[in-house]
Amino acid sequence: MSELIIKNGYVFDPISGIKGDKADIAIKDGKIVEKVSSKAKSIDASGKTVMAGGVDIHTHVVGPKVNLGREMRPEDKLFRGDYRGGIVKQGYRMEMGYSIPTTWKTGYAYSRLGYTYVNEAAMPPLMAPHVHEEIRDTPILDISAMPVFGNNWFCFEYLKNKEIENNAAYIAWLLKATYGVGIKVVNPGGTEAWAWGENCNTIHDPVPYFDITPAEIVKGLIETNEYLGLPHSIHLHGNNLGNPGNYTDTLDTLKLAEGYKAKNKFGRTQVLHNTHLQFHSYKGDSWGTFGSAAKEVMDYVNKTENITIDLGCVTLDETTTMTADGPFEHHLMELNHRKWANCDVELETGSGIVPFVYDKDVAVIGIQWAVGLEIGLYAKDLMRTFLTTDHPNGGPFSRYPRIIKWLMSKKARDATLDSMKRKDKVIAATDLASMDRELNLYDIAMMTRAGPAKALGMSSMYGSLAPGADGNVSIYNLDAKKIPSDPELIEEAFSKTAYTIKEGVVVVQNGEIVAEPKGHTIWTKVTMPENLQVMRDIKEKFTKSYTVNLENYAVFDDHVYRPRALEVEVA
Amino acid sequence: MPKVYENVGCPYCGCSCDDVRVTVSDDGKKVLEVENVCAIGTEIFKHGSSEHRHRLPRLRQPDGSMKEISYEEAIEWTAQHLYKAKKPLMYGFGSTNCEGQAAAARVMESAGGCLDNCATICHGPSFLAIFDNGYPTCTLGEVKNRADVIVYWGSNPAHAHPRHMSRYSIFPRGFFTGKGQKKRTVIVIDPRYTDTANVADIHVRVRQGHDYELFDAFRMVMHGHGDDLPDVVADVPKEQILQVAEIMANARFGTVFYGMGLTHSDGRNHNIDIAISLMRDLNKVAKWTIMAMRGHYNIAGPGVVWSWTFGFPYCLDLTKKNYAHMNPGETSSVDMAMRDETDMFINIGTDAGAHFPIPAVQHLKKHPWVTIDPSVCMASEISDLHIPVCICGVDTGGIVYRMDNVPIQFRQVLDPQGLLTDEELLNKIADRVDELNAQGA
């Protein structure tokens, strides 16, 4: 029986509504409790900020495309950072890589930022055993992974025939087969089109051969998700990412959720999570007229309660873009002409990888940077607006402290804007320079913990300091009553926690790894009546089209590490 | 009653077939029958229950003979030598599962040594090209379901990957390829008229060692300079170059499967680099993918596992302890051996004795040499210590990566009868090295 008490910190916990009051947080046997005995180990957090462990709703940290990115970019390892060059080896294993760190560095680096649970945003089902091998080798963090369904042949066929029940049975089966957590959709229909070298640029472009449109896929998957009552909503990367003028397609996509209501027992209220909204909020008809549509898109999001979003900020770094949106990566390679990897996956999905330099002296990139921050600053409900970089696409997760700085300080935003060569063009094409809003610590706690945990349907476990939640706590060297006027100190405080506590174990102290317990694999277990039609369809596809036998496709139980199931029952 | 195992993975080539049927004797010790598998795969399963298998480690004695010792003694011997060595090298992994490869990474990080895999002598040039130019690829099912043009360049699956053409490329009837071979155009580019060329629609007889020029010619056509081609390039007539380029440009979905005819003839990594550039050209007008014909059933594995562990797929120098370093030429096994830089050698899941140049083997042999392998091979017979382990896919399961990097879950069919798996053995060695490091610190 282990007991821990964190005393006298300024606590920010949106789930219990604590807004910076001094409070004690007690942990017993890995869970938050009302109180502990006098024998409990005590941590003095006076003058510090206390929040629940961070929750990343959308990141690419484990799996085949992340790893192909690591493999094809030895130069990414030359970014030495503080933890290379023979300076420090803090944990049991060495830490390598910058934009696409190794699994070990991923676990350590997230922990130093105070994050304890991350959601891998794209798992190709066929490659699920690979994802779970990497989860095994990622220390400390709890991890879930979302299988991709937006280009899946089963879903195409069921949804075309409006067979929601069959689609639901298939998805339930696949979540079990892959130990996946929810429904991810990437460029619906477009990646299947890319298998023939084509794309679906609007929600009404038909998918070659399958005779279904992205709009029908998205609506069908929303219906399926709510039929099942999964913890998370569908998690969507829409069509036409990254192009000038795409905000109208984004609004068309968001409107697909109209009329749907969340049905689940997990406290989730949205039916659609639109991820990395920054990449979908552009005006203009060419790179020359490129501009921000953050206001137009956020006006819609603000008034639409059944939608959540995350930012997908650009951090102005050299990074590695990677997505299951195969045609987009090919398009990006045609723009920057750097090396390009692609992997189309039979019957299911595809992916692409291109290194990218977000050079702040290029106007379009300065505008992208501004759009990401504008989305955060235009947001009225920060319980529906989450901080991400679409790691590593807009920049590495290790830059989250810098984004917090920008969101909390106009001075910091102005300083970055001032350093841009095309500053005037960026100012003219965006609203950022005229926005005075500065977010506070409670806002940040919503965007980085409470909000994402609620949207994932897991606020009873994560992102919360209420009794019963996992004992995941981060303590920052930031006096909530005396926020420093120098924004750099905000970034520094969020870069290295004073303490990160994972299930009651101190894993980081003064910014250094001191323990590395193993995390859990979070997945959704759906129990529903057997569907003979769907089982027959599955057998048929494996006999005729797959190159792996059905019996070897589902991840064997002994290849899943410390699983923790969220249970759903469908009558 | 004999027991039948279905959906068994085959530990032979990079096809990593997972549809094998193995019948095993009642006591789980003998393989009676193997079905669905090629002749070579059959032999590997049969070897699993061979009476000639060693089941205990053997340590070389002062008189040169080998004496059986316990696993505990072998683990202690290996850990002590690793702890003492300044630059030990562990090399191999074509025939181990990923769990073993992950444990090996742990051993060599703790010991501060070098770690390399068979890619260093086969598809290493592919890695070099991928570092420079990327890798537009797909899974094998995409080829089966979509491809209407197949190119084998410098590879001969009829012998090296016996079921490749029937399971994945030329013959299967896939979703959009219901007519199978009838509707596919097969092009084989090879200096020899191989058994694979024998089933091709077009055999392009490139001059040996001149593949780069032929790639260049195809790229010229793609860039609109076909008229400027000389009458013959690399022994191939201009008409045939234009004909093949036309087929490629008009493909619905094409795949190039290339092998060691490209990675280990003149040009090496540059051949792969330009092959990838040709794919980039072709993807402007059609859909094309490329795939390395990886040799062994899990030789893709170490590149995958070590990329997530260290960020590099091969040629790892972990002697710096705090960070990994990779520089093929400097940190590649054969180069280090030729310069006599390593002071201990662990050969695992391969046979460096048979595959390395003789001077490299002679240098390695001056220092302690451990072979971890289920079989007796040239490496095991010149070792100071031979530690037999389970055969992945026979005595133990585990995850392996097929040539298209699709993870395949292998199964155990035989009772290991006391043999350790690579993973168990290596983790015990790592535990012991950690203890020695702690005592020494």
Image (tube, coloured by chain):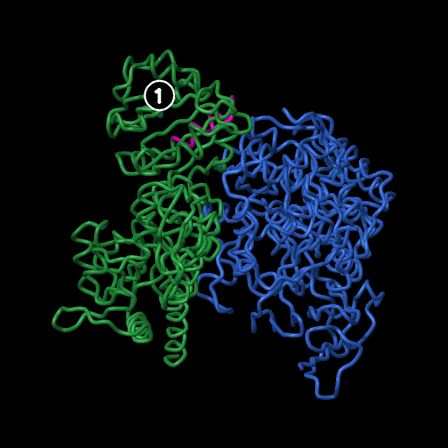
Residue at the spot 79% in from the left edge and 69% down from the top edge: A466
Residue B132 location, quadrant: top left
Q: Residue B418 in the image: x percent, y percent?
A: 36, 68
Quarter of the image with the N terminus of chain B in it: bottom left
Percent position of residue A132, x then y: 55, 55
Percent x, y of residue B26: 40, 59
> Is residue A288 on the magenta stretch?
no
Depth order, front residue of B406/A317: B406
Which colour represents chain B? green
Q: Chain A is which colour?
A: blue
Which chain is mark 1 on?
Answer: B
Q: Residue B277 colored magenta?
A: yes
- Residue B359 in view (yes/no): yes
Disc 1 residue type (three-letter): Ala
What secondary structure prevails in the magenta region?
A: helix
Q: Is residue A425 above or below residue B229?
A: below
> Toward the viewer: B92 or A370?
B92
Identify the residue at the far bottom of this view.
A38
Q: Tell whether A254 sits left or right of A87.
A: right
Which residue corresponds to the image point at 39% horizontal and 27% vertical from the top-left? B151
Identify the residue at the far left of this view. Answer: B63
Quadrant where the C terminus of chain B is found in the figure? bottom left
User: In front: A460, or B326?
Assistant: A460
Above or below: residue A566 compared with residue A512: above
Q: Which residues are magenta?
A: B275-287
Which residue position is annotated with label 1? B217
Q: Quadrant of residue B41?
A: top left
Answer above or below: position of A55 versus B158: below
